[in-house]
Amino acid sequence: MMNFSFVFNKELFFGAGRALEIPQFVKKFGNNILLITNRSTAKSPFWEKLQSSLENNGISYVVEFVSGEPSVESIDNLAGRYCTVGIECVVSIGGGSAIDTGKALSAMLTVNGSVARYLEGVGDSEHPGTKIPFIAAPTTAGTGSEATKNAVISSIGRNGYKKSLRHNNFIPDIAVLDPELSLSLAEDITVSTGMDTFTQLLGAYTSTKANPLTDSLALDGLR
């Protein structure tokens, strides 16, 4: 038998309608949350139901809308804005950009300085792995960020880059996989994110670092 290791979410909830349970999941960590999402999610019928449920559960929340991949500037700006307001949980509902933003913020709210200091291949410091509890609910297929330990951060310009903020502790504490959240996606986005999913599963299955656990997940996903 080959040697391998695997790091999981602490909790994962799957099923239609499970995203409406997010307020109950949040209560495990506190009542003051930072909610990261995108405009399209906020236009869905789900959004109004979620807001009502948060309020009925006595949860105080502030919403930040994001678009495009998180940048060093956007993460630094948001971390600076919320580092002193007692955020007890970060919740991301959206595609990979929203989840990566929330993942990076949950980590950067516990340390000082720019996120660039901690990026692989760019920074000069190692992040200690501290974070605010983080819940991720994807609305698209393909990225898988709700189950990974890294957030991809970009810097635009002549010397631009895409690098990861990475630590085992950054895997979301709770992943909420609700297939109903993807029903309002435009057809072209559904197709492109579906192909992204297929490509990542195929890459994982054919990888020279594949193991029995990843093979079982990849094969089932490909089917």
Image (cartoon, rainbow, N blue to C red):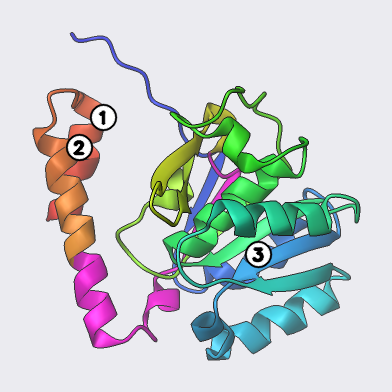
Q: Could you say which disc has been placed on residue 213 in the image?
A: 1
The three-letter code of the residue at mark 1 reads Leu
Q: Is residue 40 above or below residue 160?
A: below
The CA span between labels 3 and 1 is 28 Å
Which badge, 2 or 3, is on the more N-terminal residue? 3
Q: Is residue 74 left or right of residue 57?
A: left
Q: Secondary structure at mark 3?
A: helix
Q: Is residue 130 left or right of residue 93?
A: right
Q: Where does the image place residue 97, in percent across and percent down from the top left? A: 47, 62
Residue 37: tell me if it is visible: yes
Q: Where does the image place residue 32, in percent across and percent down from the top left? A: 85, 60
Quadrant that contains the C terminus: bottom left
Q: Secondary structure at mark 2?
A: helix
Q: Closest to the observer: 15 or 221? A: 221
Q: Could you say which disc has been placed on residue 216 in the image?
A: 2
Q: Is residue 43 above or below residue 115?
A: below
In contact (CB < 8 Å): disc 1 and disc 2: yes
Q: Residue at x 83, y 50 (%)?
A: 83
Q: Where does the image place residue 141, in percent across and percent down from the top left? A: 32, 64
Report the magenta residues as a range. 171-194
The three-letter code of the residue at mark 3 reads Ile
